[in-house]
Each structure stands twice: as structure tokens, then as C-alpha cells.
Amino acid sequence: MPQAVRVMLTGGFSRRYTNGVREFEVQARTVRGVIRAMDELFPGLGEHLEEETSIAIDGVIHEVVYTQAIRSGGEVFFIPRIEGG
């Protein structure tokens, strides 16, 4: 059963995709569920979250593993990826 998860975006990312809204509460159990929930709120956003961000869960940055469980009340922060050359 899905549970409440707090989702946060950076200011620049939120300006580009969510009309400046930076924090959301969605119902999800995994990273994939969070991305799907955000895509339902903002169609097309899921693809950008997958391709352009890293993920911190409860303050710890993770390699993106879409099946990663998220605890009830957990926080997921999408961070724009920094590309180097």
C-alpha cells in the first residue's frame, strides 16, 4: 500500500517544470513510484527526473535504483546532475 512521501526539488528545477512549487507530498513506496506520482501531477516530468537528476533519500545520495524502498514519511530530494568533462 502506498504511503506518504515528501518530495523536494531545487529552485531552478521547480521553476522549469512545476511553476516554482518545490515541495510535494505523494503516495509511493519506491523511487519509481515517486517518479510516477510526480509525472501524474506534471505530465512529462518523470522523464526529466530520470534523465536529469540524482536522488537523495532522507539526506543520503543514492545511485538511482528505481526499486529502492522509501519509508513512510521519508524525504526524496531530486538534485540536478552536474556534468563534467
Image (cartoon, grey):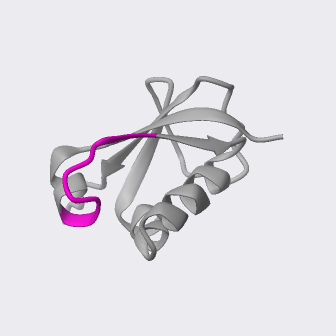
Picture quadrant of residue 72: top right
> Residue 2 in the image: x percent, y percent?
75, 41
Q: Residue at x 60, y 23 (%)?
A: 73
Q: From the viewer's perspective, is residue 66 above or below residue 47? A: above
* Residue 68 in the figure: left or right of residue 9: right
Tally of marks: 0
Picture quadrant of residue 1: top right
Q: Residue at x 60, y 62 (%)?
A: 36
Q: Is residue 65 visible?
A: no
* Residue 4 in the figure: left or right of residue 10: right
> Residue 55 in the image: x percent, y percent?
45, 44
Which of the two residues, 71 or 60, is positioned nearer the viewer here?
71
Q: Residue at x 45, y 74 (%)?
A: 43
Q: From the viewer's perspective, is residue 37 above or below residue 9? A: below
> Residue 82 in the image: x percent, y percent?
24, 54
User: Does the magenta portion include 18?
Assistant: yes
Q: Is residue 14 visible?
A: yes
Q: Quadrant of the C terminus?
A: bottom left
Q: From the viewer's perspective, is residue 7 above or below residue 14? A: above
Q: From the viewer's perspective, is residue 11 above or below residue 38? A: above
Residue extending furthest right? 1
> Residue 62 in the image: x percent, y percent?
52, 39
User: Does the magenta portion include 79?
Assistant: no
* Residue 42 in the figure: left or right of residue 13: right
Q: Residue at x 41, y 50 (%)?
A: 54
| Residue range highlighted in magenta | 16-24
Which of the two residues, 74 or 63, is positioned nearer the viewer here?
74
